[in-house]
């Protein structure tokens, strides 16, 4: 691994004027411009320009919502646990703060995604003012709020590592980070009317996906912002690489266990599985998820090139949204009442969902929002670090 570490220290850093920084600014500008156009379409045309309807009311934005929540939780689990165990490259408080900023940059756009999907956005505050904790959605929202508060406290206390409150709060943050993606899976698992969703394995699958995508984003950010002469950034990248590999292997093992049981009895398994494997959404599972999100990045992660590790992790972080889509859309695309789809005819009464251009453009705006929050978070950290010095 010595040659890999040496190559890592020679990489181009994400600093002003570098080619990486220029590329990042280009991605941000394109995403912001196209995303703003998507928002304009949304606010002028409403939900009519979206691909979802009465039978499939949750689409791309809800998948991005769960994906962003997962990245936030996975990044905090990895960085918080490694910080507590004093793992190589993670004992520095700056790495913990970077993970917290990354988590906030993922979770806030996720909130915006579901806020836009709600339709009645002005009523969103009622989930806090008039909560009903028998609702999994209410429980999730309150846990998200608790996570943000704990993460903010950890961020501030990390400037004072000797604080007696830092380590207990990190433990609490890890607990919340494990609970939040698991609750996201439980959000579907408790829906008894949907046989595809009604599975005890869903919370574990969502947790494994969250850890994998969060660790992948940590590797990408760690690679771009690292390269110090001490070699600690290289150790962080190497440790995170192994976390991504293990997370991917565990996730795909769990997914195989779930699907193998569902398709064992060819005459009795849920039709949703057919939609995933051979239906209109086959390409999401076989090409995006298994090839681009599994086989290709795993092969790249087993090379000796840190650049390949970062590229593979970015591929994982992007394509693992397919795991959310594979859970979300097929579970809605099968009607509970036989013949219902033929009883009424309307363009909004369809069990086939395809995201529209407006939905993809708004997704780009969420990317730009996340990049903005991450950049501002890093600038805020520099300001606080300078004052403490």
Image (cartoon, grey):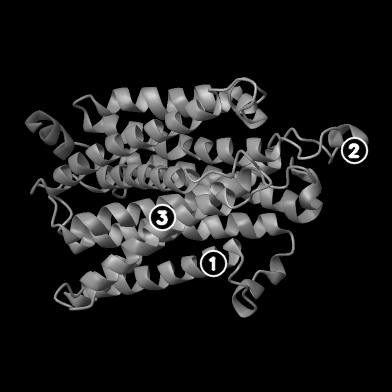
- Distance, label 2 to label 1, CA atoms, is 35 Å
Q: Write the residue at 36% across / 71% down.
A: 150
Residue 349 location (% of width, % of height):
84, 39
Q: Is residue 156 left or right of residue 2?
A: right
Mark 3: give few (<14), some (14-19) or many (20+) Cα within 10 Å: many
- The quadrant of the image that shows the C terminus is bottom left
Residue 172 appears anywhere in the view: yes
**Residue wearing tag 1:** 139
- The quadrant of the image that shows the N terminus is top left
Q: Is residue 260 left or right of residue 117?
A: left
Mark 1: give few (<14), some (14-19) or many (20+) Cα within 10 Å: some
**Residue wearing tag 2:** 346
Occupied quadrant, residue 105: bottom left
Residue 6 location (% of width, % of height):
10, 34
State the SS at label 1.
helix
Q: Write the residue at 53% across / 22% down.
A: 264
**Residue wearing tag 3:** 72
> Which of 28/43 is in front?
43
Which one is earlier in the sequence, the residue at label 2 or at label 3? 3
Residues at marks 2 and 1 touching, judged by CB atoms closer than 8 Å: no
The mark closer to the camera, 2 or 1, is: 1
Q: Is residue 76 left or right of residue 205?
A: left
Residue 15 location (% of width, % of height):
28, 49
Residue 378 appears anywhere in the view: no
- Distance, label 2 to label 3, CA atoms, is 39 Å
Q: Write the residue at 28% across / 72% down.
A: 169
- Distance, label 1 to label 3, CA atoms, is 18 Å
Residue closest to the far right: 344
> Which of 287/313 is in front?
287
State the SS at label 3.
helix
> Which of 8/19 is in front?
8
């Amino acid at each position: 691994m010595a040659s890999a570490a040496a190559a890592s220290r020679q990489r181009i850093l994400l600093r002003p004027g570098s080619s990486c920084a220029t590329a990042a600014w280009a991605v941000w500008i394109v995403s912001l411009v196209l995303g703003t156009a998507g928002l304009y379409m949304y606010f002028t045309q409403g939900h009519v320009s979206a691909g979802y309807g009465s039978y499939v009311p949750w689409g791309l934005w809800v998948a991005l919502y769960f994906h962003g929540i997962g990245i936030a939780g996975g990044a905090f689990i990895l960085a918080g646990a490694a910080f507590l165990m004093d793992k190589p490259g993670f004992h520095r408080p700056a790495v913990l703060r970077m993970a917290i900023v990354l988590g906030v940059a993922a979770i806030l756009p996720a909130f915006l995604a579901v806020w836009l999907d709600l339709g009645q956005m002005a009523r969103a505050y009622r989930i806090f003012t008039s909560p009903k904790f028998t609702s999994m959605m209410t429980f999730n929202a309150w846990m998200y709020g608790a996570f943000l508060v704990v993460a903010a406290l950890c961020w501030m206390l990390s400037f004072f590592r000797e604080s007696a409150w830092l380590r207990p709060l990190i433990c609490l943050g890890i607990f919340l980070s494990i609970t939040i993606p698991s609750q996201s899976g439980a959000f579907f698992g408790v829906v008894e009317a949907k046989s595809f969703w009604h599975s005890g394995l869903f919370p574990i699958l969502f947790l494994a996906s969250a850890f994998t995508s969060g660790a992948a984003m940590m590797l990408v950010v760690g690679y771009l912002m690292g390269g110090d002469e001490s070699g600690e950034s290289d150790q962080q990248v190497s440790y995170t690489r192994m976390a991504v590999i293990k997370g991917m292997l565990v996730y795909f093992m769990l997914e195989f266990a779930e699907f193998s049981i569902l398709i064992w009895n060819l005459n009795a398994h849920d039709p949703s599985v057919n939609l995933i494997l051979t239906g209109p959404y086959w390409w999401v599972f076989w090409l995006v998820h298994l090839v681009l999100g599994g086989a290709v990045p795993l092969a790249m992660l087993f090379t000796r090139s840190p650049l390949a590790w970062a590229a593979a992790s970015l591929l994982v972080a992007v394509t693992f949204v397919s795991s959310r889509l594979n859970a979300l859309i097929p579970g809605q695309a099968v009607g509970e009442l036989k013949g219902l789809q033929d009883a009424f005819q309307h363009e909004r009464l369809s069990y086939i969902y395809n995201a529209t251009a407006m939905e993809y453009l708004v997704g780009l705006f969420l990317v730009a929002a996340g990049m903005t929050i991450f950049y501002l978070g890093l600038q805020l950290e520099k300001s606080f670090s300078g004052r403490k010095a």
